[in-house]
Structure formats: structure tokens, C-alpha cells
Image (cartoon, grey):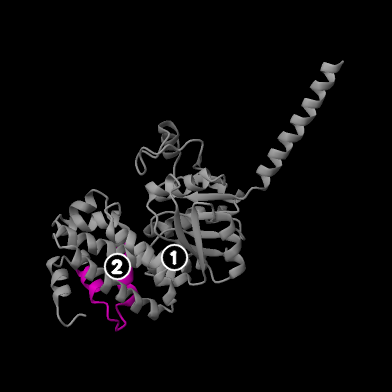
């Protein structure tokens, strides 16, 4: 009789324990990360490792199955185990999420909007974690979203390399939205112990930062490819930041954004490290590898597209941005890379 009583007590305890766990799981905030590249995978892993409920939405069943078989993102983020991260190719995942994070190349946004818009609940916040502008229109990605969807749209940008983010190395980002209530709510969903979120209402400044830092990283790579010294590269970065400030003022961005994670933080990271794809892309251009060959290898970086987008944004206005104009001529009009060095040597440019 005593054994039966103990068994009944254990059964009741187990029932309530399972019920409590299930109930807590239901009310946990869920994030869906769209994009199975290096950064999207790293973001999903970072949140997953911190205990957040997260799904990684990839574009095809074949990609999903391959990632599950390999236990890693072999193509974009090799040697980092995915563990039991939820990977799906079903866009229905968006309907059950409290927050959707877009981590796809900026030049692909128009296509993805058409694919996933119908699955996104109207009030679900959408967080843009891509860096750049829409290449077709030259407009900010947030504007592209707000023309198509009624959802709250936020911007997420900062100095994060995917390999370090995936293993939860401490990092920081800027999260931007014009409404502070929405901003605080989404920051609470995305925040975790090893990723500090700096909140700002400067959506345009944060987006501009993500585009400019990629352009500057390509330029630093070109100079390294030309075997320039660190002094020359430092001058390029300083003058590039000056041009960033000029464009930021023109679009109505806040100057303090320049000093935050999305501005100086990301510029420092990508311009000084060859972990940056943009830096490596520029390095190959500086070594006189042909753009046609790089296109064939499918290694064009976001900085390549950002150069075109930023140039389109400001070319009709008389802004003092000679470095960015020179970068545009090198990448799109086959100008000699030595012209960038000559520009830096020009005594009139200070």
C-alpha cells in the first residue's frame, strides 16, 4: 500500500512538472530568423544557445536536409555544430513567431518580400539584420518593407563576425525604431546575456552605417592589395568617416549614431580584419583580379552593391564624397585602383 501511495505521488508530481514545462514553453517568446547564410545561422545559434526559442528558416528543403545531415552549415559556417537548433523550410514558422529577423543579402530583399509576406502576421515585428540598401531602387530597406507591410519594422546592426557570434562570444549591436515602446519590447525579445543591445530611434543612420562600413571595408582591402601601409589605410578610414558624416547629415541621421556599434564599432571591425568578406573582396580587387572572375566565383560582397546604392542615393546632390565616388568608378567603370591612392595623396583633399 505504501509503495502504491509513493507511486501515485510521483505520478502526480511528474504530471504537474510536465505541465509546467509545457506551459512555460508555450509562453516563451519565439524568434524566426530568415536566411541560412553565415550571419543568419550565427544569430539563430546565439539565441538558441542563450535559451531563446528560435527557428532558422532556409529557402529550400534540400538546404534544410543537408544542414541536418551534416550537423553544421557546411557551405557558410563550417565546423560549428548546430546541435538541436530548429531548422525549417516551412514559411508557416513566421506565423507562430513573436519576432522575425531578416538576415539575407540586402540585394535579395524584394524577392524574399514576395515569398514570405503572406505568412507574416500583421502585428509581428520585423527586424532587418542585413546591411545595405535596396540595390534596385537605392532606397533604405525599412522603406521597402513599410511600402509592402504594415508591421513594425526595426533595424539591427553592429560589429559581429558570424563565427564568433555563433559560439556566443560577447558582442553588441544597435537596434533602431522610431517608437520607443516597440523598441523596448523587441529589445527584450532579442537581448541576451552575451549580446548587448543599444537602443536608438535613428533608423536611417543605423542603416546608412551598415552600408558605409562595407564600402570602407572594400576600400581598405583594395589598399592592402596594393601593399599600402597602415598609415594610408588609417587616412582612408578617417576620410571615409568624414564622408559618412556628410551623408548622414544629408539624410537626417543622428551624429551620435556614428560613435555607436553600428557606426564606429562596425567600421573598426570590418576595416581592420580580414575576417570581413568585404575586406577580402577588396583585397582581391587591389591585387588586380578581374571583376568578371569574381562575379563568376559568386564572391561579390555586400560592399560592392552598397557602393552602387549609396552612389545612386547621393549622386544628384552636391555632396563632398570623393572617396565613395572613386570607389564607384573602380567597381563599376573599371577605373584603375591606383586612382584611390592618388586621391589620398592629393594635397587638396584634407
Mark 2: give few (<14), some (14-19) or many (20+) Cα within 10 Å.
many
Q: Is residue 303 magenta?
A: no
Residue hosting label 1? 141
Element on which disc 1 rests: helix
For this rendering, which residue is in front, 316 or 285? 285
Q: Which region of the structure is painted magenta?
A: 305-330
Residue hosting label 2? 308
When asked about the image quadrant of residue 321, the answer is: bottom left
Q: Main secondary structure of the magenta part?
A: helix
Residue at horizontal 14%, vertical 74%? 345
How far is the residue under mark 2 from the one under mark 1?
15 Å
Residue 225 at x, y = what percent?
Answer: 16, 58
Residue 8 at x, y = what percent?
Answer: 82, 23
Assign the C terminus to one quadrant of the image. Answer: bottom left
From what the image shows, is residue 115 above or below residue 328?
above
Disc nearer the start of the sequence (2/1): 1
Amino acid at each position: 500500500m505504501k509503495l502504491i501511495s509513493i507511486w501515485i505521488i510521483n505520478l502526480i508530481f511528474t504530471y504537474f512538472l510536465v505541465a509546467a514545462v509545457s506551459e512555460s514553453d508555450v509562453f516563451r517568446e519565439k524568434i524566426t530568423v530568415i536566411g541560412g547564410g553565415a550571419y543568419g545561422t550565427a544569430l539563430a545559434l546565439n539565441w538558441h544557445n542563450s535559451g531563446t526559442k528560435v527557428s532558422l528558416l532556409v529557402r529550400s528543403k534540400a538546404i534544410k536536409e543537408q544542414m541536418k545531415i551534416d550537423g553544421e552549415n557546411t557551405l557558410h559556417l563550417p565546423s560549428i555544430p548546430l546541435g538541436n537548433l530548429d531548422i525549417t523550410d516551412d514559411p508557416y514558422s513566421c506565423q507562430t513567431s513573436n519576432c522575425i529577423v531578416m538576415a539575407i543579402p540586402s540585394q535579395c530583399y524584394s524577392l524574399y518580400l514576395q515569398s514570405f509576406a503572406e505568412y507574416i502576421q500583421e502585428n509581428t515585428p520585423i527586424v532587418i539584420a542585413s546591411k545595405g540598401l535596396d540595390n534596385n531602387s537605392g532606397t533604405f530597406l525599412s522603406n521597402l518593407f513599410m511600402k509592402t507591410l504594415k508591421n513594425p519594422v526595426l533595424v539591427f546592426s553592429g560589429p559581429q563576425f558570424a563565427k564568433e557570434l555563433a559560439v556566443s562570444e560577447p558582442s553588441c549591436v544597435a537596434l533602431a525604431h522610431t517608437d520607443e515602446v516597440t523598441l523596448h519590447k523587441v529589445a527584450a525579445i532579442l537581448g541576451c546575456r552575451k549580446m548587448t543591445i543599444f537602443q536608438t530611434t535613428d533608423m536611417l543612420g543605423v542603416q546608412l552605417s551598415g552600408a558605409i562600413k562595407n564600402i570602407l571595408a572594400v576600400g581598405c582591402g583594395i589598399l592592402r592589395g596594393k601593399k599600402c601601409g597602415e598609415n594610408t589605410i588609417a587616412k582612408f578610414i578617417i576620410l571615409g568617416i568624414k564622408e559618412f558624416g556628410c551623408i548622414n547629415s544629408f539624410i537626417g541621421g543622428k551624429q551620435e549614431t556614428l560613435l555607436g556599434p553600428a557606426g564606429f564599432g562596425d567600421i573598426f571591425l570590418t576595416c581592420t580584419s580580414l575576417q570581413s568578406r568585404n575586406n577580402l573582396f577588396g583585397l582581391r580587387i587591389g591585387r588586380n583580379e578581374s571583376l568578371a572572375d569574381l562575379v563568376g566565383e559568386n564572391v561579390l560582397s555586400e560592399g560592392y552593391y552598397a557602393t552602387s546604392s549609396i552612389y545612386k542615393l547621393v549622386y544628384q546632390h552636391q555632396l563632398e564624397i570623393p572617396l565613395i565616388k572613386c570607389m564607384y568608378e573602380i567597381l563599376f567603370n573599371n577605373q584603375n585602383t591606383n586612382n584611390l591612392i592618388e586621391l589620398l595623396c592629393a594635397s587638396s583633399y584634407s
